[in-house]
Amino acid sequence: MLHSVAPPETLAPHRWLQRLATPPELLEGTFASWRRRGVRTLRSEELRAFLAGRETAPGRSVVLTLDDGYLDNWVSLTPLLEAYGFHAIVFMSTDFADPRPVVRPRAGEAGGEAITWKGYLSWDEMRRAESKGAVSIQSHAKSHTWYFTSDVIVDYYRPGNALTGPRSRLRFLWLNAHEAAKPFALSELHDGAVAWGTPVYEFAPALVARRFVPAVREAEAAVELVAREGGAAFFARPDWRATLDAAIARLRSDGRPTGAYETEGERLDRVRGELTDSRSLLTAKLGHPVDFLSFPQGGMDATCERLAQEAGYTMWTMPSRAGSRAARVSDGPHRVYRCGSGYGLFGESRGTAASLLSQRLVLARHFGNPVAHAVTGAVGLVRRLTPRIGAAQ
């Protein structure tokens, strides 16, 4: 499973996306290695036949998937797929599809035009990519967001968890307030796009969340306090958290509601709509059946699986917490288990050769190779122990 295929520096200031990006030269090295070793990429219909037990998959078969539908999947992924004769499945969240009638230049074909890396796929780019035979577009649901799930405040928006941070998920604070602008989020998101001090309540991926909508007055009070006390500089104070918590506690002391929960019925209707609307729109825009679903952020449960099947999906991906391993016929016809890129076994930025060796070992482990399992386990243990040893010296 991959996401973005772009030079990380072109995705600044979004450090969370830079962390997800695969440099094009690394992916090209991967494809060259796969071709030398006789690796074959399967299409969704071949995967479906395998899981249903109707066909056997050739040896050294993989299904290459990419989540989210970033523009660079058109700009740099499709030329590489065409050059090496491989195929990929791109899962698109329809809220993020660029509505403009635009097809932007691809790497190596720009003719002097500047390459645009940041953005999401347009419908024309999706159709053009599919027409070349190297890509199939499938569903990544609709909203690809997170929702608050209770009135418990776990943090406040501050420089330490800013929108562009490498591990921050808080971009949903902006996305949920600007749904129509989602296709252009990578151009508009910046650390100041959400007011400092905005409360962050417990949250979860949209498809598994029972949504809680907090009272507006709590955010207004917290944001006003932070602005009055110096804005971002307020968070350098050692008592910043206690000060904000005390302000919220004073508000809540009057007994007024802290917000409202959606009912379970409302949640089911919302999730059903997400899955159905995404599938319907993709089918209408692309002109072919869409029946393969990747649950965003791995956020799914048994209810989501039932609703996905009712919506017409025949296969869906399982979250990493369910186990990263090769798909098996014994998993049944619907569930597809995946693994990540496999590049990071020896750490980040170790070079192409180390990354390719890492991926080869990780994939072998997922296929059940006991030697690869032992090697990857040993490397992981050494990496975990090394910082502790250094700290003890």
Image (cartoon, rainbow, N blue to C red):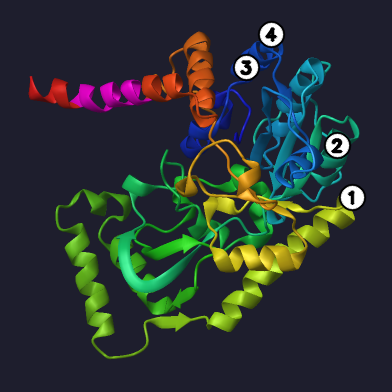
Assess disc 2: are there few (<14), some (14-19) or many (≥20) residues with their C-alpha within 10 Å of its C-alpha.
some
Q: CA distance from mark 1 to mark 2?
A: 10 Å
Q: Mark 1 touching mark 2, by CB under 8 A?
A: yes
Residue type at mark 3: give it: Thr
Image point 65% across, 51% down: which residue?
332
Circle number at residue 30: 3
In this view, the mark in front (2 or 3) = 3
- Camera-side residue: 26 or 112? 26
Residue type at mark 1: give it: His
In this view, the mark in front (1 or 2) = 1
Q: Which residues are magenta?
A: 377-387
Q: Quadrant of residue 278?
A: bottom right
Magenta segment's dominant SS is helix
Query: From the viewer's perspective, is 323 left or right of 30?
Result: left
In this view, the mark in front (4 or 3) = 4
Q: Secondary structure at mark 2?
A: helix
- Residue to which mark 2 is pinned: 130
- Camera-side residue: 152 or 178? 152
Residue type at mark 4: give it: Arg
Q: CA distance from mark 2 to mark 4?
A: 26 Å
- Camera-side residue: 300 or 261? 300
- Residue to which mark 1 is pinned: 288
